[in-house]
Amino acid sequence: MGGVVKRKCTEDLANLRSQKMQQLLLQKLLNYAPSKLNSSIITITNCIYTKESLEICSKLLEINPEAYTAWNYRKLAVEHYLQSETDPDSIKTILSEELRLVESALRRNFKSYGAWHHRKWVLSKGDLSLDHEFRLLDQFQKADSRNFNAWNYRRFVAAMKKVPDEEELKFTTDMINSNFSNYSAWHNRSILLSHLLGKRVQGSFPREEVLTEEYELVHQALFTDPDDQSGWFYHLWLLDQTVKPDAPVLVSSWPVQGSDVIASFNGNLNGCASSPFTNFHSDTGEFPLILYFNQVVEGVNSATVTVESIFDKNGDLVWRPLSTNYSRNAQAWVTYLKFPDIKDHSLKSYSVEVSLAHCQGIISSSGSHYIHPCQFAFTVSLQPLDLEYTERGPGVEMVVWTDDYFYTNETLLQDLSPTILSFHQQRIKEDHDATASMWPSKTIANEIALFRELLSEIDCKIGKLTLARLLMAHDTIMSYNKTPSAYNKVHSEEVLELLSDLMKLDPSHSRYYKDEHSLVLMQKVTSNRELLLKHCWHYRESTSSNIHVSICLRLNNLSLSRIGSIEILLSVQMLDLSHNELRSIEGLEAMQLLSCLNLSNNKLHSFTALEPLRLLKSLKVLDISYNEMGAHSIDTRRYLCSSPLSHTVGSDWNVDDCKTDGINMTNYWEAVLIFRGLNLTQLDIVGNAVTDEKFKLLLVKILPTLKWLDGDDVH
Amino acid sequence: MGELEMEKHVLYILSVEKKKDDFESVVMEHLRINGAYWGLTTLDLLGKLGTVDSDEVVSWILKCQHDSGGFGGNIGHDPHILYTLSAVQILALLNNLDVLDVDKLTNYISGLQNEDGSFSGDVWGEVDTRFSYIAICCLSILHRLDRINVEKAVNYIVSCKNLDGGFGCTPGGESHAGQIFCCVGALAITGSLHHVDKDLLGWWLCERQVKSGGLNGRPEKLPDVCYSWWVLSSLIMIDRVHWIDKEKLVRFILDCQDKENGGISDRPDDAVDVFHTYFGVAGLSLLEYPGLKAIDPAYALPVDIINRIFFGR
Ligand SMILES: [Zn+2]
C-alpha cells in the first residue's frame, strides 16, 4: 500500500512553509497579548496594540482563519480604538479594515466559524452598508451554493436590513430554478414559507393556493432527477401540511361511549354475562379512564376535562400523561377513578359522564388548541367484594402461552365484543363538517395520480415510497370523513406491497421499510372488528373459575418489528406479541388494562426497552424469554428510558435496598430501574444473555410479589 | 477488505503526540486540547489508555485553564467553551475530575447562558447549539446541571428544529449531522427526546448513507468517516440505527485506514489525521465492532466511565 497517493498530504506539504511561519507569528502575537481574557469581564488593560502586532495578527488570520485567539485580539483592538474615536469617518475606516480582513480570511477558508462571527460582530459595532454584504453573499453563494455559514449569514443580514420574507423567498426560487439540487435553498424556503403561512393565517397569503404552487415547484425537482434528495424532504413536509389537522382531536377512549363496565376489586364476576373487554379487576380499588388524542397534547386536567360521577369529585381527579419520559405531554392521558366504599352485596350501576369542553387548555405541540367539544358517557357496575375470589384471581395460577391453551369460539366472541374497538364515535360526528375544504383530498388524489404516472415510466425508490405515503394519507383523510363502519383502510394491501418492493429495491434501508410495513399491517389488522376478532382467542385455564382475562389478543408470528394502532386496543388485558421481530414496545404504555403480556422470541436488546411497562400498573404476568437482553454492547434505548443519565430519575438514585451479594449493581442498573415498581407475579426471562443465577436472585429481591420465575416457584 | 489495524492505530496516535513540528500539529496548535481528547479516547476504546502518562496530561490541561474557569485550546490561548468540554472529558477519561475547581468551572459555563436559553461560546457572544450541548454535557458530568436554566436551554434547542426533523446552529439554520448530534445529545442528557420526531429525523439520518456505505452530513454531499460518529450516535439515541446497513458502513470505515502507518482518513486514500482516526474508531465502537470498548452516544466517552460517573458510588 506504499504507493497510494495521499492526495491531501502532498497538497498540504506545499503549505507547510507558510504553516511554520504561522506558528512563529502566533508565538509573537501571544507575546503581545498574554492571557487577555482573564475573567468573563473583558479587561483590555494588559493588552498592547501596536502597528506591528496588528499586522502580525492580520497575516496570521489570512493564513489560518481558525486561529480564534487572533480574532479575539482584533476585537479587543477595535474596542480599544473605538473608545477614543468619535469621528464617524475614522470609525468607518477601522471597521472597514476588519471587514476586508474577514473577506480575505473567508477566501482562504470559507467555512471558518470564527471569521463569519467576526463579521457579524463588526456589523454590530457601527452603521455599515448592508448592500455590500448582499453583494459579497451573492459572490460567495454563487461559488458554493450549499455553504451553510453563508446561508446563516444571509438570514442574519436579511433580518438586520428588515428584508421582507417575500423577497428572500424570491431569492430561493431563483436559486432553485438555476439548480434543483440545492437542499440549502429548499430548506430556507421551508423556513420562510412557514413563517409567512403562520403570519398570514387569515390574510392575503392563501394557504391552499400557496401550497399548490409549492407542489408544482417540487414536482419539477423530483421528476427531473428522482434520485436527487433535495426535494424529498420538502415534498414530505408539504404532504404533512396538507393532511394534518391543526387542532388536536380525541380519537379513542376507554371506556368507550355507551359501554357498561363491570369493575371489581378482589371480587368475583360469576354470573355476569358481559364482555371480557369491559370487565376490569382492580387490586387497588380504582379503574382507569383513558383519553387518546391524534397527537401529543398537554394541558389535560380537571379544568379542561370534566368527569361527572359518584366516584370522585372532578376537581380531585389527577390526570397523568402516559409518556415514558415523564414529560408534561402525551398522546394518551389517564386518570384513575376510585371505587366508593361498598359494603352491601348488590350489583349497582353508576353512570359516568366525560366532557371535553371548547376550551383553551388542551394544546398540541405546535400550539393549536382543542376546538372539538365532545362528550361521552358510560356506566360502571361495581362488583361486590368476595374474599374467596382472591384465591382464584388473576396471577393466582401460572399462565401458559402455548397454543393448546387457546381456542376460538366465534359465536361467543361475536356476542362478547361490541366494544372491542376503542374508536371514538363522537369524533366522527364532530369532524363530519360539510363546509370542510375538499382541497386536501383533491390534492392527495392528484398527487397519487402523478406518482403512479412517474412509476409507470421509471422504477424509483422515492416514487414508491411517496406513493405509499400518499395512499396512507388518503386513507387517513377518508377516515375523518366517514362513518366507523367504513373505517377500512382501503389501500393497506397496496401500501404493504409497495413497502415489500422497497425492501428489495433499497436493501440498505430495508429495516426502515420493514418498520413502516409493520405499522401498516397493524393498522390493517385493527381496521375493523371482523379482522381483529380473527386474532382474539379464548384462554383456557386448568381450573374453571370465571376469570376476566380470558380473551387474549394474539398478534404473534406476524413478523412485526414495531407496534402501532394502540389507540384501538385500549381494552386489551391479555396480549400475545411473541415470535415477532420487535425491538421496541413504544406505545404500549397506553394499554392501562394490560395484565398479561407475552413478548417472548423477539429482538428486544435491553431492559431499557421495557420502559413502557413501568406505567402499566395492572401488569402481573410478563414473558420476555428468548430475546437479546444483555447481548449488545450498545444500548439504543439508553436515552429513551428515564434514568440518572438523562436526569429523569434523581441523582440520589439509590440501589442499596436491593443490593445482592456478588452482583455489581452498576452493571444492572437498567434491570433495577425497570423492574423495581412492577407488581409482577410471573416472569419468564430464560433465553437471554443475562440470565445467570445471581441475576435471578437479584430479580427475586426487586420483585417481592413474584411467584414464578421461568416456570419455577420462587418460594 | 481486512480488519481494524488496532496496534497500528495505537502507534499512530502515540506518534502524533511526539511530532510537534509537522503540519498537523501546527494547524492544530490552537485546538491541541481537542486533539488530546480525540487521541486519548481512541486509545481507551482500543484498550491502551494505560500507555499514557496521565499525570503529565493532567498538569498540562490545568495550565490551559484561565482565571475565569474556562479552558483554552492550548497554553496561552483564550478560553472557549469548545476546549472546556475537551478538558472535562479528558479528566473524566483519566478518572481525575477531582483536580477541578468545580464551582469555578460551573460559574464560567453558567455565565455563558443567554436570556433566551442559548449559550455563547465565549465572552464574544457567538451563539450556536453546539455550545448548548457542550454546556449541558459538561455540567451533567460534573453533576451541576441545576446551575443553568435547563428548561430555557431545551426550548432554545427546540426552536432550532427544522421541518426535516433535524436541527441547525441557530433558529432557521440548515440541518447538519454534526449539529443534529449536538441537539439530540443535549436533549438526551436533559431527558427531552420527546421533542424529537424520531421517525422523521431517523429517515433523514438513515438517508445519509450513500452507495459506498459511508455517511454524509447533509443531502447530496460526499461521505466522510467523521459522520460515522455524528449520524450514528444520533440514530442510536433515537433508536433508529437499524435503519442503515451497518456492515457496509463498517467496510467503508475500514477502507479509510492507512494499513501501513496506522490512522484513519475522511475517505479512502486521503491522508489520515487524529480527528478522523477518533471518529472512525468511535463509529466502529457504536457498530459493536469486536474488541473495542463501547462508547456512550450522548457523552462521547466510554460507557464504563459514564456508568461509573452516574451509577458508581
Ligand atoms: Zn470529516
Image (cartoon, coloured by chain):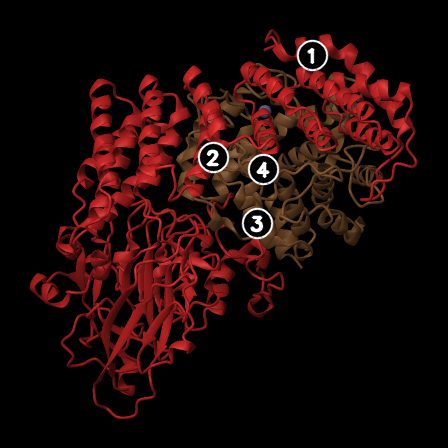
Chain colours: A red, B brown
| Labels 4, 3: one chain | yes
Q: Nearer the viewer, residue B153 or B192?
A: B153
Number of the front mark, 4 or 1: 4
Question: Which quarter of the figure has residue A475?
Answer: top left
Depth check: give the residue in front, A526 or A292. A292
Where residue A74 appears, as percent x and y from the top left, is 81, 27
Is A685 drawn above or below residue A66 in the view shown? Answer: below
For label 3, count other residues whose C-alpha is less than 10 Å away and answer few (under 14), some (14-19) or many (20+). many
Q: Is residue A708 visible?
A: no
Image quadrant assignment for residue B14: top right
Label number found at residue B170: 4
Mark 4 → mark 2, Cα distance in angstroms? 12 Å
The residue that disc 2 covers is A191
Q: Are marks 2 and 1 on the same chain?
A: yes
Front-most of residues A565 and B32: A565
Tell me, yes or no, whether the two marked residues, 2 and 1, touch with CB atoms within 8 Å: no
Q: Tell me where residue A516 appears, x and y as whole percent.
A: 31, 40
A528 horizontally vs A385: left or right:
left
Quadrant housing residue A417 = bottom left
- Kindly identify which residue carries mark 3: B154
Q: Which of the marked residues, 4 or 3, is nearer the chain's N terminus?
A: 3
Q: Please indicate whether residue A246 sits to the left or right of residue A115 in the image.
A: left
Is label 2 within 8 A of ligand 1 (CB to nearest ligand atom)?
A: no
Q: Which residue is mark 1?
A: A12
Q: Earlier in the sequence, mark 2 or mark 1?
A: 1
Mark 1 vs mark 3, CA separation in Å:
41 Å
**What residue lies at 30% left-to-right and 71% top-to-bottom?**
A354
| Image mark 1: chain | A
Badge 2: few (under 14), some or many (20 or more) residues near its Cα, within 10 Å? some
Q: Secondary structure at mark 4?
A: loop
Amino acid bearing label 3: Val
